[in-house]
Structures are given as C-alpha cells and as structure tokens.
Amino acid sequence: MLSDDPNDILLRAGKITEAQLAAAQAVCRATGKPLAEVLAELNYVSSEEMAQLLAEHLKLPFFELGEGFRLESEEVHLIPEAVARRYCMIPVKKDKFATVTLVMQNPLDLEAVDAARSLTRLEVHKAVSTGDRIQSVIDKFYREEAHIERNLQDIVDLEAGDVGKGLDPGLNQADQLRVLVNDVPVVRFVKLLLLQAVRDRASDIHFEPGEKDETVRIRVDGNLRIVTPPPPSLYQGVVARIKILAGMDIAERRLPLDGRFRYCVHDRVIDVRVSSLPEVFGEKMVLRILDRAATVGSLEDVGFEEETLIRFKRILKLPHGIVLLTGPTGSGKTTTLYGALRFMKSPEKNIQTVEDPVEYLVSGVNQMLIRPKIGLDFASALRAILRQDPDIIMIGEIRDAETAQIAMRASLTGHLVLSTLHTNDATSAFCRLRDIGVESYLIASTMKLVIAQRLVRVICPKCSRDVAPSPEAVAIARAFFPDADSWRFRNGTGCKECAHTGYFGRQAILEFLEVTDSIRELIAGGGNEHAFRQKAIDMGMETLLANGLRKVRAGLTTVEEVLSVCPVPDGMDCRGV
C-alpha cells in the first residue's frame, strides 16, 4: 500500500515509474545525494513539480520564494542557521496567535517539526517549497550583513542618554572619548557601517557634521547616496573610534589628519584609508575602502572594443616605451593598469610596481608601497627598482618632473613603463609632461600610447527596458553616428538589485591615442594642445564622447550618463531639430 512518503506520492501521480525510482535510489546510495536532487539531475521530475505535488497531496500551501521574498530579522532569530540548513526549512510567519509557519522541503519530517517547535515554543504550521530555493533564502538572509539597515536603525533609536551614561565628569574631553569609543552602540555602528560598505560595493564612506544633524553617505558606482547616520549623541564617539582604529590622534581636532587600518569581512582583508578635516560644525571624515583581495578583472572587462583591445595588447608586448592612462581621480585608470599587468605577467617577465596605495594584490607581480613620511617617494623608489632587473615597471602616478624623467630614461634603456597622469583627455598628456619640466625630445622618443578614460554607470540588467529617447539625445548621437535614429535606447527602471538607481556597476569609455611618427614630429616641434587633438582626430582617434555613445548604441548605458562625464563640445547643435 502506498503511503504519504514523497516517493510514493510521485509514483501514485504517475510522475515516475518504479524502475526510475529504483535507479534514482541506487544513485543516492552511491553518491549520498538527496533523492529529490538525483531525480532532478536524471530529468525524471523537476524539484518544483515534486514540491507542488507534495503540497497539493498534503493540502499545504506552496511558497515560491521568488526574488521579492525576504525574511525579517525576528524570523531569522527563531531558528538557528545550522538547524535551518540541516532540515532545509525556514520560519516565515509569526502572528498574534503565537504560531509560526515553516516552509520545508519535506513537511513529513517529524524530527524537523519537533526541533522547530522546541526552539520557537510556538505552534507550528507547515508549507512546502523546493530545497534549492529554501537554501537560497538561508544563504541570503542568515548573514550578519543581511540586516544591517535594521540594526543600524535600532542603534539610532537608542535614547541619547543611554550613550556614555557612565562617563566620569571629571575626565577631560580626550579621555571621555577614549571611554566612549568602547561603548557597545559605537562599536556596533562602526562595524555594521563597514559591513554595509563592503556589501554595497562602496568605494568611500563620508561622515559630514552639520549644525543640527549629521549625514553619512557612501559612494557606489561613482555616485554618493545617503545611509543611516549615527544619532548626534554617538557622532563624536564614532569619529573617535575610527581615528583610534586608524592610529590618529583623537585629541587633535584642529588639523587635517590621515591614517589607515584593516578589518576582515568573511575572510577578506579590507584596507581603509582615513582622512579627517576640521569643519565649522566638527570633523568631516572620509574613508576609502580598498579590497586588496578582490579579483583583478581582465582587459575584456574594462570596456575595450575588440579592435581597440587587439591594438592595446599588441602595444603591451613591446619591449620598451611608455604607456600612459589619463583622467581624473576615480576614473578607473589604475584598474585598467592592473588588467594590463594581469595580461602581461608570465614566468619569463619580472614585473615591478611602485604604488600609493596598493589597491589590488596580483599574483606573479612584485608590488611596492611608497612611504613619503620616511622619504620613500615615487622617484626614490623608481631609482631603487631599476637595480632589481625589471622587464616591466608600473608607476602608480607621475606627479613630478623627476619621476617622469626617470621613467622615460628607464624606457630608453629597455623597459616597458606603465603609469597614470592627471589630464582631461589623451592629447593633453604631452603638454602636461612639458609643463612639469620634461624635455620634448624625451616625450617624443619614449611615448607609445596614451589612453584617456572615464567611468560610466552600466544599466542594471535586472530592470533594463527600451525607452523613447529625447530629441536632444538623438541629435547628440546623430552627430557621431548617422544611424542614431534607428537605435534602441534603454534605461533602468530601478529595482532592489540596483538600490532603485537603474544602474549596476561601471564600465570605461576611452580615447585611444597610439603615438605615431606624425604625432612625434608635433611633440618634438613643440605643438600645442589644439594641434595634437586635431591631428589625433584626423588619424581616426575616437573621442571620449563618441566612445560613450557607442556604449549607448550597445544598450549598456544612457546618453545622460555619458554626458555626465563627457560634456558636449562647444558649438555642437543639440537642439534635435
């Protein structure tokens, strides 16, 4: 006689045959995998069909547990993660009648029900879902950072008088702060905010004091957004705790200070650079988040078109010369250089870097951190590493004539040198090098490639949709691409995945200027910036704006996003008429 066992229910419904069940059970015995997983792998029946059939037979609700589903903090705390995983179940509902609903893969598991009843001390109701979706919910919500916003708000809701309640009024301000920094709410707030920054892929955290309220913002994909601030009573304690972590003087609030510290998130070491600045209403602090263990992306991930990528890789194989990445702070120059190092590294090459700071660790590359306070700057570090028999040298940034001249003389003696420079576009690099004191003949004889770079936000793939463009957007695109009227313009509507911004992640737009003989003649002849730019465009260089619009055509970003980093040139007609 067939029972209520899930396997018998499948047989009774005609979903599988006895032979298929026997074959699946044999695989289970051999592999130790659950029967439901084996049946799905053998394509006998899907896990969703099994769960729905079980729910229907037992007259229980079926929970889909889709992307919009979430567990509240109080529900997570009802059953420990180890128990939830062991029995593949989650508590999803607790009401005023002291009941809890368990969503289970196997609602006939009496041991699991007894465990839940014992832990919750509540009446248990049952529901059904698939094992993989239940495990996905556990992965997503049984983590400390899954409830960051709620926990931060809990701290903010504390009564002001509860913070620093036991402070000795006889202590001076510095000693009071040293006591306050160890208060539990202060410690938890700093910890949770750092967790939130890593979870949300933030590059910076800003603490900004105001006359009445404080503001905390994080920078994600290049844009700042407000997050939960500490209550006024905690602000000084939070700032002081960060200063202590960073090795800064908490008693000094009149001068700008710098420091750094490390912390761990799920076995990842995160470096944090801290800068404080005295403002009218208190200390403003900015924390730069550096995940040195993050995976270095490949050049394909940066945003190069196929033809440009082939040209770049060809230049990276040259035995000597200078390759420069230009652009403002935060334009992804260093990330592109790391991608180049990853492409070039091999057992036959000695690659040496000198950086401030070391943002990523690259296996197979020798990386050096400068320390200006003890006299180890870019120029002195560069002189030292030239005695280390390098083949390829990466300099974090060319800041002065001495560093530039050493780099260029190194390229003349058989080294390939990669570095960055702060200019607005590719052709400005030559004039900038001249301005800091580098001779024109050195620039002309060593430069191989200049790439100007900006970062644009990429449309969130989860909520991307077609939109009707404005006449102005079409007119701008048509100025570079005559077929712009036939493009499919897209944007993001905003969803949970992208924090309702419509964008998720960033990609580079580029000006790629290969230094040819005609460009070298202009450099040696003392040409001006306009002459360089006109010559480069005549030779086929695609401008930043044109390259950004190419990304729009591919449906990766929006015209508005491109224009936010690449203004329309003077004189261009953008009226769309």
Image (cartoon, rainbow, N blue to C red):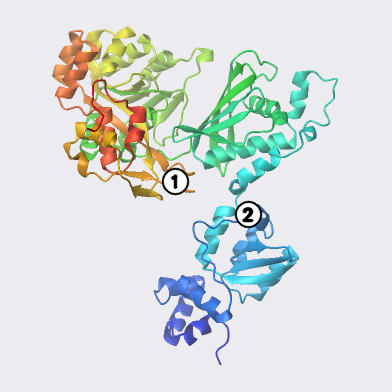
The image shows residue 486 at horizontal and vertical percentages of 20, 44
- Given the current orientation, which residue lies at the most extreme bottom position? 1
**Residue 29 visible:** no
For the C terminus, the image quarter is: top left
Give, as a three-letter code, the residue at label 1. Gly
Question: On the rendered structure, is 237 left or right of 507?
Answer: right
State the residue at coordinates (38%, 26%).
352
Q: Is 461 located above or below residue 294 in the figure?
A: below
**Real-space Cα separation, disc 1 to disc 2, in angstroms:** 22 Å
Dividing the picture into quarters, in which one does residue 89 lie? Answer: bottom right
Q: Are marks 1 and 2 in contact (CB under 8 Å)?
A: no
Q: Which mark is residue 494?
A: 1
Q: Which residue is mark 2?
A: 72
The image shows residue 118 at horizontal and vertical percentages of 74, 67
Q: Nearer the viewer, mark 1 or mark 2?
A: 1
Question: On the rendered structure, is 277 left or right of 323?
Answer: right
Give, as a three-letter code, the residue at label 2. Glu
Q: Is 128 located above or below residue 252 in the figure?
A: below
Q: Say what secondary structure mark 1 lies in.
A: loop
State the residue at coordinates (51%, 41%).
200
Q: Is 299 located above or below residue 93 in the figure?
A: above
State the residue at coordinates (52%, 71%).
34
Residue 207 or residue 453, whichever sits in front: 207
